[in-house]
Image (cartoon, rainbow, N blue to C red):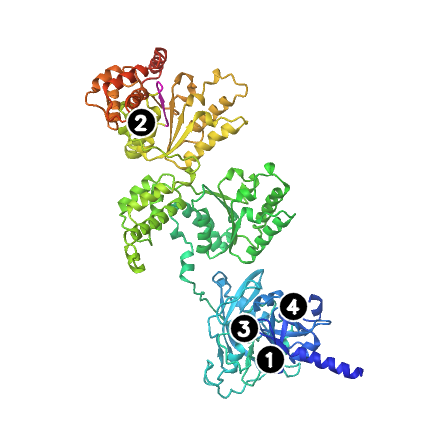
Amino acid sequence: MSSKKNKGKAKKSQDEENISFGRDGSATDLDSPGLLGLCVTDFIEKAEEKAPKRCRSILAQMSLNTMKGVTACIGRPVLITSPTGRQEVCVAWPAAQFPGRKVGLMPDMQCILGVKTGDAVTVEPITGAVLHAEQLQLSLRKEDESLDTEDFCSFLLQSLDSRILLPGSSFFVSYFGRKCEINVTSLKGVDGVTLSPLSPPFPAPSCPDAESDAAPLDLSLQLAQLNLTPSCSTPNRSSPSTPHPPVTPHTPNATPSTPSTHFLSDSALETPDQSTHESHRDSKSQTPSAGRNGNNTFYSVCSSTQISFTHTQHSKSEGQERSKVTYSMIGGLSAQLQVIREMIELPLKHPEIFKNYGIQPPRGVLLYGPPGTGKTMIGRAIANEVGAHMTVINGPEIMSKFYGETEAKLRKIFAEAAQRQPAIIFIDELDALCPKREGAQNEVEKRVVASLLTLMDGIGSESHSGSLLVLGATNRPDALDPALRRPGRFDQELEVGVPSAQGRLDILHKQLHSVPHDITSEELQELADVAHGYVGADLAAVCKEAGLHALRRVLSSTPGISDNDLMDRVKVTTSDLQLAMTQVKPSAMREVAIDVPKVRWSDVGGMEDVKLKLKQAVEWPLKHAEAFSRLAITPPKGVLLYGPPGCSKTMIAKALANESKLNFIAIKGPELLSKYVGESERAVREVFRKARAVAPSIVFFDEIDALAVERSSSSRSTGVADRVLAQLLTEMDGIEQLKDVTVLAATNRPDMIDKALTRPGRLDRIVYVPLPDAATRREIFSLQFRKMPVDPSVHLEYLVTRTERYSGAEVTAVCREAALFALQEDIKAEHITVSHFESALAVIKPRVPDSLLQLYTDYQRQHGSGSFC
């Protein structure tokens, strides 16, 4: 009874062994002997102690019962096929207490086959002939082409000895610590047959989940249809024919003394990564298996195999080629690119020169500058031009809350880059990753800084020197830890600043190169001249917005237009770019930019002398730069407007900002003061930093007497006003020159301003804005009468005479009050009469006292009239 039960269990076990799995993971019954569907499981490290170390990566672990079901012998090759058709030759190896109907594969092999634990694969023994390969043609990556040497070929012959390779597969080898990816282009056997993949070889998968969308190549079907004749070098896959008798065939059923047993020798491949893909499937009646008949022939590498390399690059799609950044795509940074070629590109391309002459190549280069200037783009262009592998680290991304994990990520990135030299590690937002340690908020930041310092010191070792470079980018170089900025770590620091007018023109040319447009070079030059403070990212956004505006313009004018006609008619014009510039503001100005009212010089009545002095100080240095240079004239750094309240000082500043087309930063004096120590000075520094970033620019301080009060008269215990004034004086004329930034200040009390601020070199020009004279009042009334329905009986000269000693604001108030009296008299009034003006003059009186006018007269006598230069 017991014997019958055991026989029943054995029969049931045998039935289970003959169950395979379909492509969807469902179980299917395989009637063909030797072909078995198994489930992938993890590799057991302790089970292969008797196997040669260099062969362990290609072992397929199975239980003894499973090996019997597969009809595989210990240490003999088996063909494993994944559900997607990827195939790989492995070595069958028994494992004690291994679960049934499962095959244990190393993680690398799972990655090659594109499977993971729990997926179904088919396993079958190789029953056909295994011949030696006479020639083996391989292809290298572009960055590994320098390895095409005789020594490397000898290394491959030793590593691949007795290894069965499949055409179109890929594998990895480690050569002096450098991980190299190699593709099998074709192979030729000793029988004269050349095998090539039916479709272009696929790259080796980088992760277990990677799958190809194309139909994979089933090598077993391909080999089963080969036409093996002595006179042909390429197999005929379309029609079967009588196979050519194999030369010294090695079948799987041979004795262990046959050459195929070399799979288990110490000269086997160390860590191969291969993937083979299926291109055609026969009808369901044909079993997709290898080694089912005598026509199946495999080829293994031997010591006499000749290895050659082809340097063909994988074809890339048009979008990939377009996205490849090169130096020619970067505009406005020619000076920076020239420096980069000298100190970065040369050591990466020719490290042997530096080694022979004992010159230490730079380990790190720090790029600093405002956002959007092209720091990251430069890093990618360097990697593409040099042909180096690039790893991008965004500072905050690798930070982790777990102890030691952030440092481990950094070490892993540097280790991977060291294996793929030449390599570039680009760290964006470096200040977030490596702030100053004395101001660090927690211990994690300190450990990260220490780890990066240690890793960068290790770059100078013999194995990395010249082939690994660290590029850092930051907007705040002063926030970095000082230990990073010393020679030996970040050896060089390169500023990537806001582009000049010529740089902006270059950027616009490159942005519009592939865009249909009707813009002349002269018009583009004018646009570049007025785009003050725009960086590369801003100009790219301007061109994009201009293209969208051109598209909307054509669609609105011609609804229902076809796509072909639309492509022919959409062209970017100058007006599109001008409109886009009104919508896209410079990045550095977005925090401080104000909407400047459309006030023109013509809207400011009279004051021709004041207008001329401001034009000389602000507009002339830009429009007539050659004349200033010829006469060695230094443009004024600042202009102080003082005068009675209501004399259009602020309005003149608005007109200057609008007419000059410069970036205008308006600061109200008291808004910079803060109750926190140091915040007021920091606010002043930030204002001037942004002004320099968007130069040429105007910084307008309204009511500056509240900010720059004379130091001896300040009775505040905190001394904040004194510190703010000292910071303001240093910014305007300190060690760091204030270039292309004009300071415009307005005040009613010039006597309260510190004398150090009004000396030449700071506020060079002191301009008195007096009460309007008769001519100025006449012009102000004329400007107001253009907008108001005034009765013809109103005499302009009469009003000019009655408004003696009135300020400009008071004259405007008279007109406004007269209009209100007209509405008070009759809500439907259509004209403003003389009586209405008389009522307004009775209400609005001049409010500037004689004492204040005398103060201005005395101040003007002491400081002059503000003559130019």
Query: The magenta stretch spans which residues?
Result: 637-645
The residue that appears at 65% across and 73% down in the rendered structure is 265
- What amino acid is found at the position of numbered circle 3 in the picture? Gly
Residue 314 is drawn in which quadrant?
Answer: bottom left
Element marked by disc 3:
loop
**Of the residues under marks 3 and 2, which one precedes in the sequence?**
3
Residue 83 is drawn in which quadrant?
Answer: bottom right
Q: How far apart are the alpha carbons under marks 3 and 1? A: 17 Å
Q: Which residue is mark 2?
A: 614
Q: Which residue is mark 1?
A: 126
**Of the residues under marks 1 and 2, which one precedes in the sequence?**
1
Q: Which residue is mark 3?
A: 85
Residue 639 is one of the magenta-drawn residues: yes
Residue 506 is one of the magenta-drawn residues: no
Neighbour tally class for label 4: few under 14, some 14-19, many 20 plus, Cα within 10 Å? many
Res. 571 visible in picture: no
Tag 1 and tag 4, C-beta contact below 8 Å: no
Neighbour tally class for label 1: few under 14, some 14-19, many 20 plus, Cα within 10 Å? many
Element marked by disc 1:
loop
Q: How far apart are the alpha carbons under marks 1 and 2? A: 92 Å
Residue farthest toward the right in the current orientation of the protein? 1
Residue 128 in picture, x, y percent from top left: 58, 82
**Of the residues under marks 1 and 4, which one precedes in the sequence?**
4
Q: Which residue is mark 4?
A: 41
- What amino acid is found at the position of numbered circle 1 in the picture? Ile
The residue that appears at 29% across and 25% down in the rendered structure is 827
Neighbour tally class for label 2: few under 14, some 14-19, many 20 plus, Cα within 10 Å? many
Q: How far apart are the alpha carbons under marks 4 and 2? A: 82 Å
- What amino acid is found at the position of numbered circle 2 in the picture? Leu
Tag 3 and tag 1, C-beta contact below 8 Å: no
Residue 539 is drawn in which quadrant?
Answer: top left
Which-is-in-front pick, marks 3 and 1? 3
